[in-house]
Amino acid sequence: MLSLSDPTHFALGLFSANCSSGLAVTKVPERWSGSWEDNLAAAQIADEAGLDFLLPIARWIGYGGETNFHEGVLEPIAWAAALLARTSNITVFATVHTAFNHPIVTAKQIATLDRIGSGRAGLNIVAGWNEPEYRAFGMDLPSNHDDRYAFGQEWLDVVTKLWTEVGPFDFDGNFFHMEGVHSDPKPLNGRVPVLNAGASPQGRAFAAKNADFLFTPVQDFDNAAATVTDVQAAAEANDRSIGVLTLSHVVCRPTEQEALDYLEYYADTNADWQAVDNLMALQGLHAQSFSPEMLANFRPRFAAGHGSYPLVGTPDQIADSIEKLAASGLAGTTLAFVDYAAELPYFVDEVLPRLRQRGLRA
């Protein structure tokens, strides 16, 4: 399970397996299906191997290109419920867009997930950035980042009150006006781990005030260390502790050349470049998850893994990189593969023992 209780334990989780193609913006035939059957197989491998968490993406329309990247997506609440019922130890997050989900409904959904999983549910909050999805919902994306997070703050205030308040209460805010509202059951431990993805100043401030974990991309080890320092200082100013997680894509092979060859095959020769450019354009316009400098230089990374950090090479090389990520102060990273179920077992057999030997995994 994912927690901050052991700072020497570097957390590992799977990210975006509920989406077709995962994080790889590629046309190769073996790209991830995103099917329920494949998700269950990958989740059970991760659970049995002792990985810490599963993190989905909430996506409603694809990014175009030849593959219409992320066209097929399993809805995160239903996905999490099914996986919590079929796993034993791993934390399963549900990703929720505050603009598209009422807090009364979400509070009860997450508490129900936590009961299904005997305390293993988590909530990933998305304050909003994907403007075409807002149009699909018949809504306008607030152009001001502050406005999105002001709404997200009140949304989370309602959810938290529903998890902790005994008996009915009224709520009269700027965005929500409620009378005689209550929610049972509650999460088993009063609340669930809360994760917030973001790299903008507003996103980091929101995470520092509210979240157990900030989920953010990093450019390199120095950038990771600076991010951790800034975010933890902001959390301490709120009398809180927070862990910083990043995202990675993995190509692990017996030799470095095999890994590099496969990376070139799926993320260059067979990249869906139109989908890559569509994705990067939206990230730059509205998300602010990547700096302009990162967007200018990260096109290959977006093809390989949605802009995530590359873990490419032999088991020893990947263990070296993970050790450096841990040394930067990060609490963990997510993992993504071209084919999660086919490639995860080799990572489990070869990389995890090396991480345990280095004292990075309990």
Image (tube, rainbow, N blue to C red):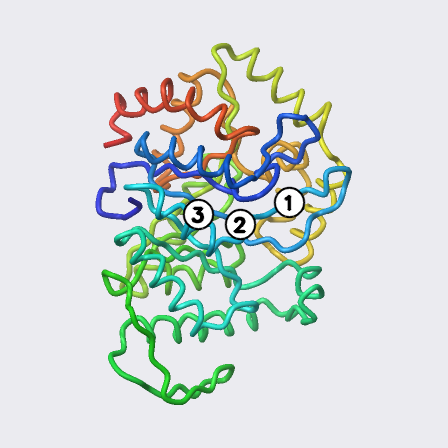
- In terms of image quadrants, where is residue 194? bottom left
x then y, percent, for residue 21: 61, 37
Cβ atoms under marks 2 and 1 closer than 8 Å: yes
Q: Residues within 10 Å of mark 1 (few under 14, many from 20)?
A: many
For the point 35% across and 40% down, the residue is 329
For the point 38% across and 68% down, the residue is 108
Residue 70, label in figure = 1
- In terms of image quadrants, where is residue 19? top right
Q: Residues within 10 Å of mark 3 (few under 14, many from 20)?
A: many
In the displayed structure, does residue 29 sit left or right of residue 103?
right
Name the foreground residue: 238 vs 186: 186
Q: Give the quarter of the figure containing the N terminus.
A: top left
Which of the two labelled residues, at mark 1 and mark 3, occupies the earlier sequence position? Answer: 1
Which of the two labelled residues, at mark 2 and mark 1, occupies the earlier sequence position? Answer: 2
What is the total number of numbered labels drawn onto the structure image? 3
Residue placed under numbered mark 2 in the picture: 57
Q: Residues within 10 Å of mark 2 (few under 14, many from 20)?
A: many
Residue placed under numbered mark 3 in the picture: 227
Looking at the rendered structure, the kind of residue marked 3 is Thr
Question: Which mark is nearer the camera, 1 or 3?
Answer: 1
